[in-house]
Amino acid sequence: MRSGSSCAAGAGYAQPVRPLLALAVAATALAACGVSAASPQPTRIAFGIGGGNVVPFQVVIAANGAVSASGSRSVRRTRLSRRNLLRLDRELRSAFRSGLSSRECAGTNPDVGTDFITLGRRTVHVHGGCEHRFQTLWDTLARAVGLRFG
């Protein structure tokens, strides 16, 4: 490479080598995309209730399917199958992508706790019962882990 020349990709390589370098980079990128599409990695999921006059609780579903609960509730299942974990992950991702967002429902008593669902780093809070789609997802998670209410 000549002194003072740029370090741009392919600089300093003979002209016939540049297309091979570009082809190798493209093949590597396509292979990486194929691997990630074939074996999706689920994300940590958490849900529960906080605030108000209720004793708070949280259920965590780890990326490996391990389930744990803290606070005032317990769960019947301590592990979810990979299939169920991927299904839940897919449902939540779809809902979050399609605009599921935090809401404060009009007329909700402040004594009522706020439900939440966390997927990875994003959390949606709903205080009240005005967000049917959120409640459906929350109920699906509760059933999946066998959340105990009594």
Image (spheres, rainbow, N blue to C red):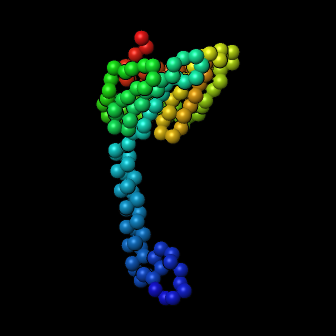
Residue 52, position in %: x, y? 60, 19
Q: Nearer the viewer, residue 50 or 31?
A: 50
> Which residue lies most toward the right here?
106
Where is residue 69? Give x, y as percent: 40, 26
Residue at the image point whose x is 40% and y is 59% from the top = 29
Q: Could you tell me how many numbered marks the image carries?
A: 0
Q: Is residue 33 left or right of residue 96?
A: left
Q: Residue at x 51, y 75 (%)?
A: 8
Residue at the image point whose x is 45% and y is 23% from the top: 71
Q: Residue furthest top?
A: 150
Q: Quadrant of residue 19?
A: bottom left
- Residue 39 image point, x, y percent: 34, 44
Report which quarter residue 21 is drawn in.
bottom left
* Quadrant of residue 77 within the rendered picture: top left
Q: Judge whether 50 appears above or below 82 on screen.
A: above
Location of the C terminus by quadrant is: top left
Residue nearer the viewer, 70 or 114: 70
| Residue 20 seen | yes
- Horizontally, residue 64 falls left or right of residue 135, namely left
Residue 129 appears in the picture as rendered: no
**Relative to 122, residue 18 above or below:** below
Q: Position of residue 143 (x, y in %)?
A: 40, 20
Residue in front for this viewpoint, 121 or 113: 113
